[in-house]
Image (cartoon, helix red, strand yellow):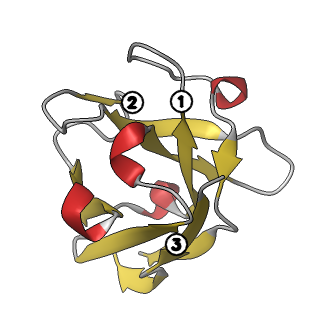
Amino acid sequence: QVQLVESGGGLVQAGGSLRLSCTASGRTLGNYVVGWFRQLPGKEREFVAAINRSGGSTSYAESVKDRFTISRDNAKNTLYLQMKTPKPEDTAVYYCTATLRAGFGFVRAYEYAYWGQGTQVTISS
């Protein structure tokens, strides 16, 4: 099965920028629909963005649309999340996730089978 490892989290000032990466091993990432979720303590995981196998289709939560960009490099087995003008409310643990489900448009955590360990993102005001 695929293993996912996130990197790039940290502390950033509001209005700055940050890029998260997720590197896959064990399987070819191009076989998976992949995405990002985030979670605050005591809250459910929240959908952030997803991208289809080829990278030609993307979907975003309304709260991050036009500010975050999801992309993938299948040759490098890597997924990215570019965060532009982040806000304090974007502070959370961000998780990379993958699924072998046919189709696209999955926004619920149960629809994804494989998860990274998470990376903390803190946006200061």
Image vertical order of residue 89 relative to residue 58, above or below: below
- Disc tally is 3
Q: Is residue 80 left or right of residue 44?
A: left
* Residue 117 vs residue 76, the one in the foreground: 76
On the image, the x and y values in percent for residue 100 come to: 53, 30
Tell me, for residue 100, which label it has, or none. 1
Q: Is residue 122 left or right of residue 117?
A: left
Q: Which residue is mark 3?
A: 6
Amino acid bearing label 2: Ala
Instruction: Tell me the SS state at disc 2.
Output: loop
Q: Nearer the viewer, mark 1 or mark 2?
A: 1
* Residue 58 vs residue 94, the one in the foreground: 58
* Residue 10 vs residue 71, the one in the foreground: 71
Which image quadrant is residue 18 in?
bottom left
Image vertical order of residue 82 relative to residue 99, above or below: below
On the image, the x and y values in percent for residue 109 come to: 67, 31
Mark 3 Cα within 10 Å, few/some/many (few <14, many 20+)? many
Image vertical order of residue 96 relative to residue 103, above or below: below
Amino acid bearing label 1: Leu
In 3D space, how far apart are the residues under numbered discs 2 and 3 (Cα atoms)?
A: 20 Å
Q: Please say if the residues under marks 2 and 3 sit with CB atoms less than 8 Å apart.
A: no
